Image (cartoon, grey):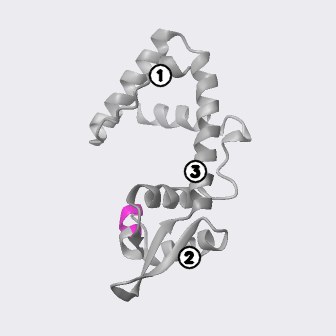
Amino acid sequence: MALEVLELLEVLWSRGETVSTSPLSSSQVRVLYVLEREGVVNLRTLAEKLDSMPSSVSRMCDRLQAVGFIDRGHNPCDRRELELRLSRRGAGYLRTFRSRREEVLCELLGKMTPTEQAMLVRGLSGIRTAAGSPREETGASVTESA
């Protein structure tokens, strides 16, 4: 069952190049998501959130800073500690990236029946519950956005 779900998700996101993470890797996009969610973090905390080695995360952050997607600065309370945060350019990238993915998803949802859409929402809600993620109220249902 898990393999089938993974394959279906891979088909969804590989559908067309409009969903590409370019110019970033999927790992770099994950860094941006964490920084967006957490605000300001140090390198050690970011590595823990990503379940990665600090040295690998540091190199990724070097590249993200070089393209202007994150900002680095010294912690005012401890000058030895670097603080990382999402830059305006990084936030703009995430907005555009989400918008492109939403367009593809809406196109696909529009090809599904309302029953299929409801089954999808029910299944994904079950996954969210099993993962222990809190339910986010968006005010719109899948069928409203399709």
The structure residue drawn at horizontal position 60% and vertical position 17%, both measured from the top left corner, is: 110
Q: Residues within 10 Å of mark 2 (few under 14, many from 20)?
A: few
The structure residue drawn at horizontal position 67% and vertical position 46%, both measured from the top left corner, is: 20
What quarter of the picture does the C terminus occupy? top right
> What residue is disc 1 on?
142
Report the magenta residues as a range: 46-50
> What residue is disc 2 on?
59
The structure residue drawn at horizontal position 71% and vertical position 40%, both measured from the top left corner, is: 18
Q: Residues within 10 Å of mark 3 (few under 14, many from 20)?
A: some
Mark 2 and mark 3 in contact? Answer it, CB < 8 Å: no
Residue 12 in the image: above or below residue 146: below
Q: CA distance from mark 1 to mark 2?
A: 38 Å
Closer to the chain start, of discs 1 and 2, is: 2
Element type where label 3 sits in the image: helix
- The type of residue carrying mark 2 is Arg
> What residue is disc 3 on?
94
The structure residue drawn at horizontal position 57% and vertical position 38%, both measured from the top left corner, is: 10
- The type of residue carrying mark 3 is Leu
